[in-house]
Image: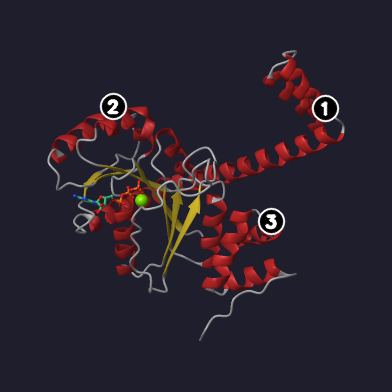
Amino acid sequence: MRETSPTRGAGISDQLLEGILRGSRPHLARAISLVEDGAGEAVRLLSHVYKRRRMASVVGVTGSPGVGKSTIVNGLVGEFRSLGRSVGVIAVDPTSPFSGGAILGDRVRLRTHTTDDMVYWRSLATRGHLGGLSRHTGDVIALMDAYGFDEIVVETVGAGQSEVDIMKYAETVVVVLAPNLGDDVQAIKAGILEIGDVFCLNKADLPGAERTRRDIEMMLNLREESGWRPPIVMTQAHTGEGLSELVNAVNSHREYLVSSGLLEQKARQSHLAILNEYLSLLTVEKVLESAQVDGSLERALKDLSSGNSDPLTCASELVKRHLT
Ligand SMILES: Nc1nc2c(ncn2[C@@H]2O[C@H](COP(=O)(O)OP(=O)(O)OP(=O)(O)O)[C@@H](O)[C@H]2O)c(=O)[nH]1
Ligand SMILES: [Mg+2]
């Protein structure tokens, strides 16, 4: 049966919610666009969606540009499908602050499984949001979860420190590395080591793979002891080699989270992150709005340009004035 598209106008959030819960793809697509556009109806929709979460497993895939993240995500989709699990994929694209368009306009999009009903791909633009994730990532995960995907895979822009963001939403973070990338060793040192639950050494067909594996191993030895020792899985994502081992490693980590009780802690972390996003959004909006009305914003801007005050003082005065 052909699925009808949601119509415009009043009651759109109710229509979309109903469609999503019934598993309608066009409704899910429309809802994600609504959320991305920051439309007013999105707020109402999300308030219902967050109550209808089914708790899909969320896997984050992160790493430097070009290490093979998309190829791996593509392979993971295939592996999950062979286990009978449905998959929603979110790929976060970097957006140029100048053009508003994707920087990597000519990037190869690896999307097989496009005719598979149980797989859905969606790109989100970061739109200048600090960090490698779109501001809406948490909301889109909630939408895909309410829709009923068993697995949600998020590929993030590999942009150094910002990769840390993915931790807020993913239960399992796969850090992808490739042999002989001097930068990667730097990245490991810069904190990426702490965020990996599973390390994937991709492009294992290239020379130097074994040495890089030992480097990662050594750095993992320096990591603080915990109940989970992140495995290093060697893959050749372009041929599919090692991908089932990668899925096994992800599943083992999941089992560990459940048996150790850490899963609950992760959920709290993710709720806190989303709450944080909304708190910042709402408080900034409120302060700016009322500061505009009573002229205190204008005064602050004047003080700044005349050098009579500094941004930190101005901001705390505005917060004191308008938030209490
Ligand atoms: N030799 C080799 N090449 C690979 C392997 N996996 C992926 N590639 C190639 O590496 C290139 C980059 O792969 P992508 O999957 O686009 O990498 P990415 O990390 O998603 O890239 P960005 O999203 O642009 O950061 C492509 O040409 C792939 O075909 C591998 O295991 N070995
Ligand atoms: Mg990619």
Residue 272, quarter of picture: top right
Amino acid type, callout 1: Ser
Across and down, in percent, residue 127 comes to 54, 45
Across and down, in percent, residue 20 comes to 57, 69
Q: Residue furthest right?
A: 294
Seen at 17% across and 46% down, the residue is: 204
Which label number is shown at residue 124?
none
Q: Mark 1 points at which residue?
A: 296
Helix, strand, or loop for circle 2?
helix
Across and down, in percent, residue 166 comes to 45, 44
| Inter-mark Cα distance, 1 to 2 | 51 Å
Across and down, in percent, residue 229 comes to 29, 39
Q: Residues within 10 Å of mark 2 (few under 14, many from 20)?
A: few
Q: How crowded is mark 3: few (under 14 residues within 10 Å), some or many (20 or more)?
A: some
Please tell me whether residue 78 is drawn above or below residue 72 in the rendered image: below
Please say whether residue 54 is visible from this viewpoint. no
| Inter-mark Cα distance, 2 to 3 | 44 Å
210 relative to 307 in the view: left or right: left
Q: Which of marks 1 and 3 is in front?
A: 1
Q: Residues within 10 Å of mark 1 (few under 14, many from 20)?
A: some
Amino acid type, callout 3: Val
